[in-house]
Amino acid sequence: TVKRILASKRAAAAILFTLTSSTAHSFTSKEPSLQGKHISVTKIMSNEVAPLVHIPLSQSDLLENEIDPPSDTSAELVAAFQGSGFLRISTPLVPLELQKRALQAATEHLVKGAAAIPKEEEESSAAVPPARPGPGTVVTHPTDPKSYVMLSPADDIASVSSVLDEYAKALELTKIAVLRCLAFGLDLDTNYFARLHSENNSSLRLLRYPAGTEDTGNRCKAHSDYGSITILLTDGVSGLEAYHRGKWRPVPHAEGALVVNAGSLLESWTNGKIPATLHRVAGPASDDIGSSKEVLLEAIGSDRTSLAYFADPDKGAMVALQDRNTGNDKDGTKDVKDMSVADYIRWRSGGDDCNAKRSGLAFTEEEEGRVTGGRKKRRAE
């Protein structure tokens, strides 16, 4: 009897997962909310950031929705997420040779695109009002020393690069693998989180950081991501740091591994059990560096390329944050918990989520408090 019940539940989950609906998902009485639900917590006292987890799931495994992911893998993944909000994964879905080709294609596109930006436009980029660029257009960031390209599902990634199109499709599968392991490890329906990503609202951002000097501070400012998860591929040039247990700590690089971190929406959906950890790309002149000065001085001598894949949930899903106000009533911001995912991303990004020059909130007040609180504690010590 128990087996028949489990089988029927899994069959129902498979049907729900494979359905393509024009209506966006939301947390209503029909979609069970995590608010008030007990989620097991693995207490991790280690200072380790981004432990390495191998996810053995193949494409055929993901197509078989009735098959649950390995319990040990799911437990490791949840423990890593709960520990620092960061982990590294190795997966057959994104082999090393595809990673190398994607990095090369991204670098070539960014270098070529940056060379086409007129010098006067580059120097005045911070003053240019936000505008939607064409697919594949390289733009200069208004505050950070970097250039980038944002490729969204509305863009034809294949027209920019067939390699990047192949890479993005591999990451779609990887996203589902991570979300299924996460839900299973939290003792939820295996497809709980995956069902909230049926619209494929993910974006791929190509980033290029030019070489700097010993006076270079953050190459990317401190921020949290605001989707569910981010999957990052880097060329191995050091500088990525996460704020964990009161200090900035370097995120280690391992060839063939992808960095995964939680966004603010996932933190909300798990009632804060999985943190949306602040992170940055530090330079030798950054404050409170966690990396060694020698490592950052070596890193700043090189250009740096990375590919960030932002997994955003269905636009109609609800943020469903716990009852708290943003404290930002001056601009008329309503309670975050009442926002849809689309409204939340628009608020965090500073406008239409297709804008080239994002100027919204790098992190929430609560997330900022984690850093300022850590500084006060260190001063007291």
Image (tube, rainbow, N blue to C red):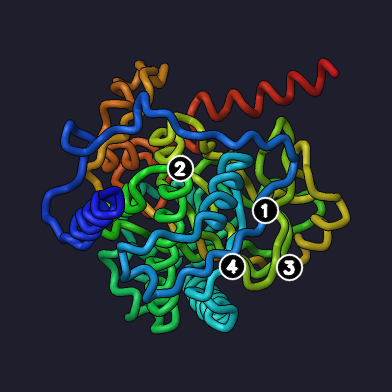
**Which residue is nearer to you in this view: 280 or 243?**
243
Mark 1 closeness class: few <14, some 14–19, many ≥20 residues within 10 Å: some
Q: Which residue is identified by label 4?
A: 90
Q: Amino acid at mark 2?
A: Leu
From this viewpoint, is residue 350 visible?
yes
Report the number of discs.
Answer: 4
Q: What amino acid type should be assigned to the residue bearing mark 4?
A: Ser
Which numbered disc flags the more N-terminal residue, 4 or 2? 4
Above or below, 249 against 145 in this view is above
Mark 3 or mark 1: name the one nearer the start of the chain: 1
The answer to which quarter of the image holds residue 316 is top left
Image location of residue 201, percent across then percent down = 30, 57
- The label number, if any, that marks residue 302 in the structure image: 3
* Residue furthest right as drawn: 294
Q: Which residue is mark 2?
A: 186
**Which marked residue is nearer to the observer: mark 4 or mark 3?**
4
Q: Residue furthest left?
A: 22
Cα distance between the residues tagged 4 and 2: 21 Å
Residue ID at (31%, 22%): 335
Separation of residues labelled 4 and 3 (CA atoms): 26 Å
Quadrant where the C terminus is found in the figure: top right
Identify the residue position indicated by label 1 in the image.
51
Q: Which residue appears at 44% of the width and 74% of the height?
A: 58
Q: Mark 2: few, some, or many residues within 10 Å (few <14, many ≥20)? A: many
Disc 3 marks a residue whose amino acid type is Ser
Q: Earlier in the sequence, mark 4 or mark 1?
A: 1
x, y percent for residue 34:
34, 32
Q: Position of residue 212 (x, y in %)?
A: 73, 59
